[in-house]
Image (cartoon, coloured by chain):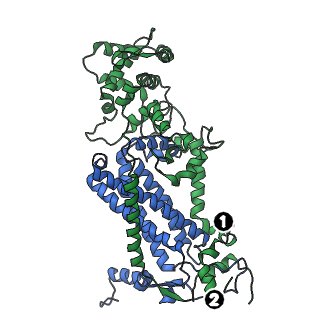
Amino acid sequence: MKRRRLSNAELNEAARHYDGPYKPYDLIKELCVAIAVVASLALLFTIFFSSPDDRPSTIAQWSRQMPVDFVTTAVSELDGTSATAGYGPPYNHNGDGQQIAFIHLQKWLGVSHPINTAQDFVLTPLASIPFDPALRKATAAYQAASAKTQAAWTTDYTNALAKATVGPGGAVVVSGSFGPVPTMMNGLLGLAQSGGLDGDLLTSNQFYQTDYTKPLLFMADGGLLAARAQSQHLLGEQWGMMNETGSYPGQVWLWLYTFWYQIAPFNTSVNADALVMAIMGVMSLGLILIPFIPGVRDIPRWVPIYRYIWRDYYRDQGLR
Amino acid sequence: MSAVDKPSWTARVREAGVRAMPPERLLPDTQPAYMSSWIYIFGVLTIAALVIIIFSGSVLGLKGPAWWHYTGIGHFFNSIHLWAVELFFFFMVIHLWGKFFMAAWRGGRGRTWMSGAITFLTSIAAAFTGYVSQQNFDSQWIATQAKDGLNSTGIGAFFNVLNFGQMYTYHVLLLPVVVIALVSAHILLVRRTGIVPPLPLGELAIHAPAADPPGAGATESAA
């Protein structure tokens, strides 16, 4: 028998044709049995493990459980120092977003969901509170002040909030002189604790609402979601969103995507998301194009797993 | 061919379809003898899991997105849906690795591999939109974390993971349609070219085969 190594082209051509024996095979029966087996497995897992369903957080819940954190976050939305306020596209022009070298996709695609955190998260909701002349006067005074004065008030107030206490009814008590900011923040806190802010941030020109961009961004700037996530092992350094609440497998197929965030330089880079997405994009393209990538497409010939898969065939053919 | 002199468009499409995929090739009742390993069952198990996903998802969709939060039967179908998804990915990944180590793209089967790989990636997107459509804490956390990755690529400008209505539409309609279309194309490609023959044993192969007729597929020998 003449034996020699086949080229890739010859291997390809050899796989176009098969002259060997066939055997009876019932594809439809196989599919029906498979459906029965998978349905049974899903049923067993359901009976033994059910599925997780932790109730969502609300702004009302956040403001009642963590009033100081809520007010601190609200002040950062008012003075433009929150993560959302400085995010850049697609929410505002206050930053350029992430980039890779000269590629600024985030900036180039523009602002598609415009958010002015001071107006949308604080001033407009405050304006919706009726019958409160003191609050209206405080808001007017804040808006009439110069940017420098506003910044001085909010900066001093934010620093003082580190020593704030929670008073009767969940109000935040801070000693000092911060202009109209405490009056505004306690007004917003009351609105939030009553549940009114949850509704205000959903309000648009439509009666029916499905877009939770504003309330989710506001809550994400605060500490409640992160605190819950940490207790459920969902933080970025805990392999993040591929996990799920409870002891469920979650999106384990995202392990490679999440892996990059655990190692340098991605775990410290300000452009980590763009870099990881670029890597995963290239790797995904590589997965699709494996048949055409020299070296990678040859791995199956070097790793003899195929000898195990087709062992019956090789044995029947008298091959070893 | 139709009885009229000039075949209708319908007749042309039918005849082209039958030429490309004769019934005995679409649903053969024999398979090559080398198809005798447990690894071959993971393709059909993946399809079976997809059937369960579509069935349980349809029940959840019929009752609306909030139903499963406040009824026991709704939670039951959500659990079936979740575990069917986990099984779907488990079976599909084993199927993918199996086909990789079989170098299943040989013999003009590159499109079959590519359609499978694209199905895998599209399924990840479909599952992801499901996770952010659950209307619970998982949805809130996953959406607020995932937005940064998507925004960094510019995709966030038109694919807003914080918009429940948009994500729900992607999850229950757009992406399932794409996944089903891709799986259908994948199956048709498998049936058209047949399952890949074994690799020649070892680095040294048996002597090269004789020239084959153009376009011959492995299943053609069964006809």
Residue assigned mark 1? A296
Pinpoint residue B202: horizontal percent, then vertical percent: 70, 77
Question: Residue B63 — which label?
Answer: none
Which of the chains is blue? B
Badge 2, how many Cα within 10 Å: few under 14, some, many 20+? few
Which chain contains the residue that carries disc 1? A
| Above or below for B73 versus B164 | below
Residue assigned mark 2? B211
Residue at 48%, 51% (x, y): give it: A249
Q: Amino acid at mark 2?
A: Ala
Query: Of B22 and B83, which appears nearest the observer?
Result: B83
Q: Amino acid at mark 1?
A: Val
Query: Of A147 and A282, which appears nearest the observer?
Result: A282
Which chain contains the residue that carries disc 2? B
Q: Is residue B154 visible?
A: no
Mark 2 and mark 1: span between their CA atoms?
A: 27 Å
Q: Secondary structure at mark 1?
A: loop
Residue at 62%, 42% (x, y): give it: A266
Q: Colour of chain A?
A: green
Pinpoint residue B70: horizontal percent, then vertical percent: 28, 45
Residue at 33%, 32% (x, y): give it: A198
Residue at 50%, 64% (x, y): give it: B92
Residue B215 sits in which quadrant?
bottom right
